[in-house]
Image (spheres, rainbow, N blue to C red):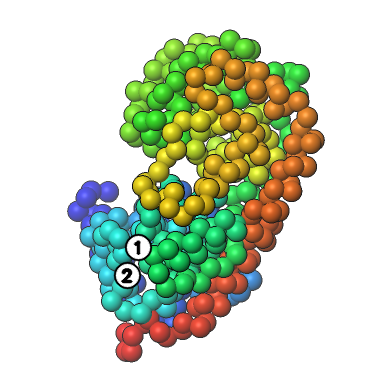
Amino acid sequence: MSRFGSFVGHWRDHRAFKRLPAADRNLVVVSESRQDWHHHAEIIGELTGRLGRKLCYIASDPEDPGLRQDDPSILPFCIGDGFFRILFFQTLQADVMLTQLLDLQNKDLKRSVHSVHYVFMFHSLVSSHMADHADSLDHYDTILCAGPHHEREIRKRESLRSLPAKQLLPHGYRRVEQLMAERREPPPVDDGIHVLLAPSWGDRTILNLFGDELVGVLLDAGFRVTLRPHFQTRWNSPDVIDSIIARYRDNSLFGVVEEMAESDSLFDSHVMITDWSGAGMDYGFGLEKPVLYFDVPPKSRNDEWQQLEVEPFESFIRDKIGAVLAPDRVGEAPAVIRELLDDPEQFRRSVQQLREEWVFNVGTSSAAAADAVAKIADECRGAGTGAGT
């Protein structure tokens, strides 16, 4: 579709949403990209199915699966990521918005001039105070927390900055549950160790700093290596990925996966290598398999995170679901991996205990979130729609 055609389509959907009766705008789910759907899908299913709710699904991405659900209880609208999205946020007349968009009010997406209750849902287990901006969560009314670490971090910031207390509700993390449900046993280690290299993105992460060397070390050790780069790396520094592929593409033990929806590499590998990516926690908690972390400089968009005096969860958990290795010890990676795989049953028992302690509502997170959001929507009904709209 042409740019003009897209503009017209977004205008029409924006107008169509505005014309809805107030009752149909009680609950609005806002999605930034097609990648968000797998986080939203189960909660929406609980809301429209078990709880019998109608909701509006507002997407920026025309390829978002949420726009094409065969469910009359989901009213879909695509408003793009430009002018109409900005206007939508500023003039929204609804009771409740549920979203995974960070930085409400801090950038171009502002709280509405009308009364709306904003609910933020985490899409990762990483902490709230290092990876994101210091004030990324300050302007939401309710936070659906993945684990107790989120509650502790948010309350500490509120105390330090004298911020109004938000409603913090125990939610959990659907991605871990999904991996638990779908996982299968990989081939026996005796048939060959399969390493999944899935680092985060950025100038100071594994691929950019020593990815070529690491892949070579692993292949020389006789390991099968699947490179699963972050999609942001493909956008920001594609030459780094392409140079590794060009060097090792003829090695039968080397493979590449760049489709984030692909799962075989997760299930069939024995160990993941990453740095500060939240994917390591998904892999460890969801598949109960170890993670080797390289201790590159942490990714942080908050220069003040240490003021909270709370260790980020992604730092705290590393040596408990795997091992941590300094970047100058790349050559030791094969030996550390063999050690991590030495006693898988003991590792599983340890991870199961950690998961129960650090992730809310394991197995029932979608139901818990849907119940919480429905309750808020009932309490706020009519508050944000405006008389006569």
Left of 226 or right of it: where is 200? left
Residue tagged 1: 104
**Image height of 276 relative to 216, above or below:** below
- Can you name the residue that lies furthest to the bottom here? 387
**x and y, in percent, of residue 317 in the image:** 60, 43
Residue tagged 2: 111
Left of 9 or right of it: where is 149? right
Q: Residue 221 occupies which quadrant of the picture?
A: top right
**x and y, in percent, of residue 71 in the image:** 52, 66
Cβ atoms under marks 1 and 2 closer than 8 Å: yes
User: Could you tell me which residue is drawn at 39 percent across and 65 percent down?
Assistant: 161
State which quarter of the image contains the C terminus. bottom left
User: Could you tell me which residue is drawn at 53 percent across and 68 percent down?
Assistant: 168
**x and y, in percent, of residue 56 in the image:** 43, 69
* Badge 2 amino acid: Arg
Upstream in the sequence, badge 1 or badge 2? 1
Q: What element carries label 1?
A: loop
Left of 51 or right of it: where is 122? left
**x and y, in percent, of residue 246 in the image:** 42, 15
Cα–Cα span, label 1 and label 2: 7 Å
Considering depth in this image, is 211 or 99 the residue closer to the camera?
Answer: 211
Q: Which mark is residue 123?
A: none
Q: Is mark 2 on a helix, strand or loop?
A: loop
| Mark 1, other Cα within 10 Å: few <14 / some 14–19 / many ≥20 | many
**Image height of 334 relative to 349, above or below:** above
**Image height of 194 relative to 88, above or below:** above
Considering depth in this image, is 162 or 261 the residue closer to the camera?
Answer: 162
Q: Can residue 262 be seen in this view?
A: yes
* Badge 1 amino acid: Leu
